[in-house]
Image: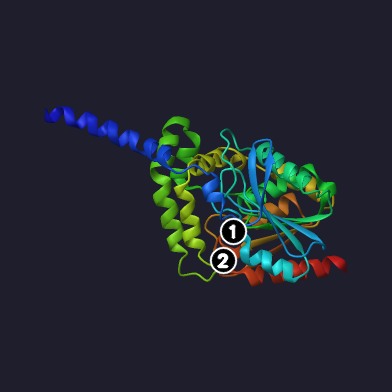
Amino acid sequence: MIWLLLPCLLIGLGLFPLLRERLRRPMGSGARNAAPGSFARLSRGLTHYQWHGPARGPIAVCVHGLTTPSFVWGGLADGLVAKGYRVLTYDLYGRGFSDRPAGEQDRSFFIHQLEELLEHEGVTGDFTLVGYSMGGAIATTYASAHSDQIRELVLLASAGLKTNPGKIGLFIRDHPHLGNWLMLALFPRMHRRGCEAERPLPTSVPGIIDLQKNELHYRGYIPAVLASLRGILSEDLSDDLRHIHRQGVPLLAIWGGTDEVIPVSSIGRMTEQARSARQEVVEGAGHGLPYTHTEEVLDLIATNHRQGLQ
């Protein structure tokens, strides 16, 4: 009888990550009752968004990254509002309070979501587009496709040039079947560990560590992260950056001096593709620079704006 237990145990272990994902809570009305802001019913589902600041003023649209929804902008949005901006933040599909549609999450997937949201909100152009991490890749592809709409492009620790997913990340990304299982099995622990490593750091978003970890409670979050790793984060955006440069879109790129996810060496590749880009380094900042070094980022944005007016 004992020899029968081993196959059953192995089957159980193999099914456990799949079952755990199935048992996670769906993103539904109960969770959304506490959501700030509003919802737009777009072609791929509900998108959660929020306006910050006055009804009038120059608009800044902020696009968050791979694993942390729009609450990541809390401190930076307040700072931009204090400088006179009207700020729009939103949750990408698969994160936060937005729906979790299945399928590939490539550039067209994310561009279409942003196009539809801006149309829903009547934003037709002349806005500042701010992208953080994977949101920088989304902002870059959007600005490349709609350069006539962009007043200024601001990229914070932006993906699209050189990312460092690590050996496990590469294996998961490049092996569809076993990679799917490994993502469900390994990512929750890796995500929690990565969040906890930042707990001692200062932050302009109260409770951000627990908010980040809370995303794991909802069904579809982990598959969405994986779909983005295989989608937009596997794309080379060199052509998009060259096009943005040729179109004369003002571009500010800000990097974290100790960032281990998007290395500061990305400066060189950015210079190769977009020579007109202004690039700054926040010394001592890691990948969380929008919320760990908020004031430094705001000062660099303000300085770049003043210099652009001269």
Residue contact between numbered discs 1 and 2, judged by CB atoms under 8 Å: yes
Q: Quadrant of residue 56?
A: bottom right
Residue 296 image offset from top left, x and y in percent: 65, 71
Q: Is residue 53 left or right of residue 246?
A: left
User: Are there few (<14), some (14-19), or many (20+) residues within 10 Å of tag 1?
Assistant: many
Task: Name the element at disc 1.
Answer: helix
The span from disc 1 to disc 2 (Cα, nearest Å) is: 7 Å
Q: Is residue 286 left or right of residue 308?
A: left
Q: Report the residue marked by disc 1.
A: 71
Task: Name the element at disc 2.
Answer: loop
Depicted 108 relative to depicted 136: above or below? above
Which quarter shows the C terminus?
bottom right
Which quarter shows the N terminus?
top left
Depicted 33 relative to depicted 204: above or below? above
What is the basis of the colouring in this image?
rainbow
Depicted 98 relative to depicted 210: above or below? above
User: Are there few (<14), some (14-19), or many (20+) residues within 10 Å of tag 2?
Assistant: some
Q: Quadrant of residue 286?
A: bottom right
Q: Amino acid at mark 1?
A: Phe
Q: Report the residue marked by disc 2.
A: 205
Task: Please report the residue visible at 56 percent of the width from the left and 62 percent of the height from the top.
Answer: 288
Residue 52 image offset from top left, x and y in percent: 71, 62
Q: Amino acid at mark 2?
A: Val
Residue 130 image offset from top left, x and y in percent: 71, 56
Residue 143 image offset from top left, x and y in percent: 76, 47
Most extreme residue toward the left, as rendered?
1
Q: Earlier in the sequence, mark 1 or mark 2?
A: 1
Residue 138 seen in the current view: yes
Task: Please report the residue visible at 46 percent of the width from the left and 33 percent of the height from the top.
Answer: 175
Task: Please report the residue visible at 60 percent of the width from the left and 52 percent of the height from the top.
Answer: 65
Q: Is residue 268 left or right of residue 274?
A: left
Depicted 188 relative to depicted 14: above or below? below
